[in-house]
Amino acid sequence: MANPGALRRDWFGNIRADILAGIVVALALIPEAIGFSIIAGVDPRVGLYASVAIAIVISFTGGRPGMISAATAAVAVVVVPLVRDHGVDYLFAATTLMGVFQGIAALLRLDLLMQFVSRSVITGFVNALAILIFMAQLPQLIPGNPGVGIEAYAMVAAALAIIYLLPKLTTAVPSPLIAIIVLTGLSIWLQAPVNTVADMGELPQGLPYFVLPDVPLTLETLQIILPYSLTMAAVGLLESLLTAQIVDDMTHTGSDKRRESAGQGAANVVAALFGGMGGCAMIGQSVINVTSGGRGRLSTFAAGVTLLVLLAALGPLVGQVPMPALVAIMIMVSIGTFSWNSIPNLRVHPWQSSVVMLSTVAVVVATHNLAIGVLVGVLLSGAFFTHKVMTMFEVVRERKGDTATYRAKGQIFYASVERFEAALGPESTQPDPAEHVVIDVSKAHFWDISAIGALDKVVERMRMNGRSVQVKGLNRASSDLVDRFALTDKTGVEIGLAPHP
């Protein structure tokens, strides 16, 4: 049962700031949702209705208060072939199945896989998104493009000045909201020749309504949508959980990643049933929300409801909002999102961490695919970590009387077994071979069956070489592995002949 104190804090602990932040987010969502709809090859209402539904539902079901979820480019790019080849109803069906998969992921605790995403990967993810957010604004800034002239540059500069300077005078109202209001008024009054929200695409009329996907309930339909649903679910969860971690860091608070996974699933199912495409958490909009003062679930709910009101009742007015004002806000987001400390840290952090961070950035920016970039970063992190642990290993040989003692120290697993075997070569090859061999592993740990196989091989080789061999110092976990998988040096525990050492 929900904690009443948490409910009050998340919904009513920051009412004024949450509502104002939600309004800013809603205005910034409109051109992005339209743009993502265009990417996916669907009507703008599909992205806009999805943003409404996802934002409202996730405010109740999500695990990270203050985080904004809506239609996203990460999901939109995945479904382009599906929409092109089979139509929008198959997109709705795939989005429904996407939500089901995300619910299953929550039950299976797949959110725990985030523990394998290193800080360097998260930094690379953040920097790459900041770059992508800025790059997405370039069409509104490149000279020669329609609606891009001196007036557009002046408006962007004016909006940035309001965004950064107004908080020095007052923080009563979020400065991005003031920038939108002021520049919209100026644009209408001066009839400035700049791009507006209406130029991005036609805004829908009326409210979204409940509709079931018009697809045949057959195995063939499942075969068509299954690959897309799995990919959408994976990409959506990955971006949502990474964004949740980033908002955790920004607000110095924690979040429930399992609940967030389930909440994303519920939000996507509802979005599909109201004619929307799939979505997930949005780092850009989440940064806008947090920097505008939004902290609770009310801010996310306010963003969804405000977007719904804007579309249903104020469409003509919203259509006149100048794009330069929204471009300025997204530039602010890209500047605020980028981890500027990561640049000087390149000289002081371990080179492996820097390579992971830069590789993540390069792959995400090159492919515009967050999942591939993060996967590359995680694989590189794993490879560097494995190499580091592998090299933290040594074997020292000591000869005393007629006994040679090999003292192993470090981690013995699949990546270090070759070094382990080489260090305990046949005793007869030593300059002073002994008749008796002791392998002391009291400062070592055997992690897997590869390590146990290596110990088997070493002991068998020593015995075939005419030496008596004793293994001592196995810790309990290593002994358990030996009992279960060793062939030549059982401790006897499994048949009750001896206790663990």
Image (cartoon, grey):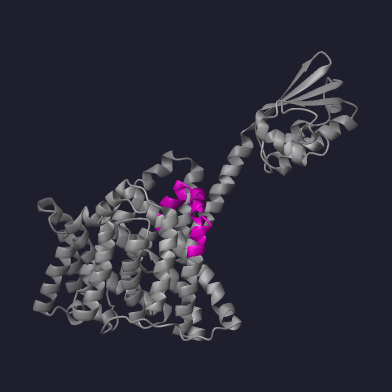
Residue at x-position 43% and y-position 82%: 212
Q: Is residue 276 above or below residue 468?
A: below
Quadrant of the image for the N terminus?
A: bottom left
- Give the magenta-colored segment's residue range: 103-128
Q: Position of residue 485 (x, y in %)?
A: 76, 41
Out of 347 and 183, give the one closest to the viewer.
Answer: 183
The residue positioned farthest toward the front in the image shown: 1
Would you identify the image quadrant in which residue 406 lies? top right
Q: Is residue 496 left or right of residue 334?
A: right
Q: Position of residue 380 (x, y in %)?
A: 55, 50
The residue positioned farthest toward the top in the image shown: 401
Q: Is residue 284 left or right of residue 357?
A: left
Q: Main secondary structure of the magenta part?
A: helix
**Does the stretch in magenta take in 112?**
yes
Out of 482 and 495, give the one closest to the viewer.
Answer: 495
Can residue 476 be seen in this snapshot? yes
Quadrant of the image for the C terminus?
A: top right
Q: Is residue 306 left or right of residue 189?
A: right
Can residue 148 be seen in this snapshot? no
Q: Position of residue 398 (x, y in %)?
A: 74, 19
**Does the stretch in magenta take in 477?**
no
Q: Is residue 204 above or below residue 493?
A: below
Residue at x-position 50% and y-position 80%: 82
* Total numbered labels: 0
Out of 500 and 37, give the one closest to the viewer.
Answer: 500
Q: Is residue 401 above or below residue 15?
A: above
